[in-house]
Image (cartoon, rainbow, N blue to C red):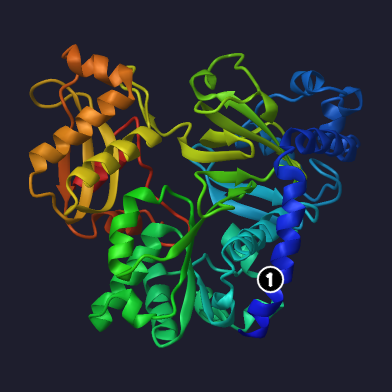
Amino acid sequence: MGFRSSLSKPLARYIANQQQGWMYNAPAAQDKWRQRLIGQAKHTVFGRDHFFKDIYSYEDFKQAIPVRDYEDLKGYIQQVIDGQDDVLWPAKPIYFAKTSGTTSGTKYIPISKDSISNHIDSARNALLNYIHETGKAEFLDQKLIFLSGSPVLDTKGSVPTGRLSGISNHHVPAYLRTNQMPTYETNCIEEWEEKLERIIDETIHQPMSLISGIPPWVQMYFDRIIARTGKPIKDVFPDFQLFVYGGVNFEPYRAKLFDSIGKKIDSIEMYPASEGFIAYQDSQDSEGLLLLADTGIFYEFIPADEFFNENPTRLSLEQVEVGKNYALIINNNAGLWGYSIGDTVKFVSKDPYRLLVTGRIKHFISAFGEHVIGEEVEKALQYAMQRHPETEVVEFTVAPMVTPSEGLPYHEWLIEFATLPKNMEQFAKDIDERLAKLNVYYDDLISGSILRPLKINALPKNAFIDYMRSQGKLGGQNKVPRLANDRKIADALAK
């Protein structure tokens, strides 16, 4: 056992014990953070505009602070960009995390001196939890790869600005830098395919033990290695023992990814966002991700089916129910207030609070009132793949076909297969029947002959890669939406 793995175990025990202090009393931790955030920000521009000095209870909080998206906060962000201090949070942000938005163009999400630890320490603690639970720490002594965006930062106003993964790269602990891959120079390459080839050059002969990244881009990395070597990943990287991922639901990728590896390995799911590190998998044996209730974020939850109402219900953590879908709202120590990050979550446990990420609040199909969400299509596809075990899916998306040239409307599933199902017609039927069981509105539309059963459009190899390349979004943290209520993506893919 090397010095990194030896030193990690007492630290892992300390972090696990510290976590025990709040994970079973998360509502109290949340109440503490609500009061602390209001107290620290009461003299900011936003705090004065919203009468923070008069907020004492959660009811006061909801009355004073409306739910917002980026567009609603843009005026305050612009004041920060223009150089003003104490706008959303005391002082200036130390970074802007740059991310893309559908209506706002590029978004600049503030990260403060107070909030940076939420991003960095939470990723570290996820690994330490794994070490404490399993006793496995040897992976720290070998090579670790983090497939991420470029660490090169620009400035917006006077604030250093870049992708969150690139910002995080500047905060990798010194004791891990000597075994972190790829090199800084390679990580700075912007063009994804050139960068990927350089990463393979640097890593293919190294003792890789941990690989981290968004599953579709890790799969692309694996595919290129297998094409070069003709070997499964377990033979190229015999020391590979831990896969760390986030950003998308892993289930549609699981079969192909583990087939590429050639053996079962441990994995850790994380839920990082530019707005904050929300949750991580704290146990290999429990379902769901542990909500981080004591890291500088006060969470609120809106029932997903009320989100677009004029006055939706806003709930604190202690008011949520297991099994219901909620839109996630955050208030944090970087100055985001009543901020909808666009994700939907569902709790699977309240003791402790563990959740699943179920989709995006704006990524759904409801062309006919069915309101099909990401969790439902992923579960339906997973069911069909279990019934057709030979099938391997690379990527997929779903869109409505509202005005077909003939016949009833339908949902079109655009799927890139690595291995086709032997019976495509039955495969489509299995998805359709499972989706109808998961969504009563879809079932009513099918049984009422308003929609016909879904159709699968099997796309050629690299269709999604070619699409993402055409949009300038190949690699990094970019991903294809699972669902759309229009045909913009579907028509581009179908070409």
Q: Residue at x 79, y 40 (%)?
A: 88
Q: In the current view of this chain or complex, which residue is farthest to the bottom?
A: 205
Position of residue 241 in the picture relative to residue 52 (left or right): left
Q: Residue at x 62, y 28 (%)?
A: 301
| Residue 432 % position (x, y) | 21, 30
Q: Residue at x 34, y 55 (%)?
A: 254
Q: Secondary structure at mark 1?
A: helix
| Residue 124 % position (x, y) | 65, 63
Q: Which residue is mark 1?
A: 9
The mark tally for this picture is 1
Please tell me in which quadrant of the rendered image residue 141 appears. bottom right
Quadrant location, the N terminus: bottom right
Q: In the current view of this chain or complex, which residue is farthest to the top?
A: 448
Q: Nearer the viewer, residue 174 or 156?
A: 174
| Kind of residue at disc 1 | Lys
Task: Indicate whether 359 appears above or below 469.
Answer: above
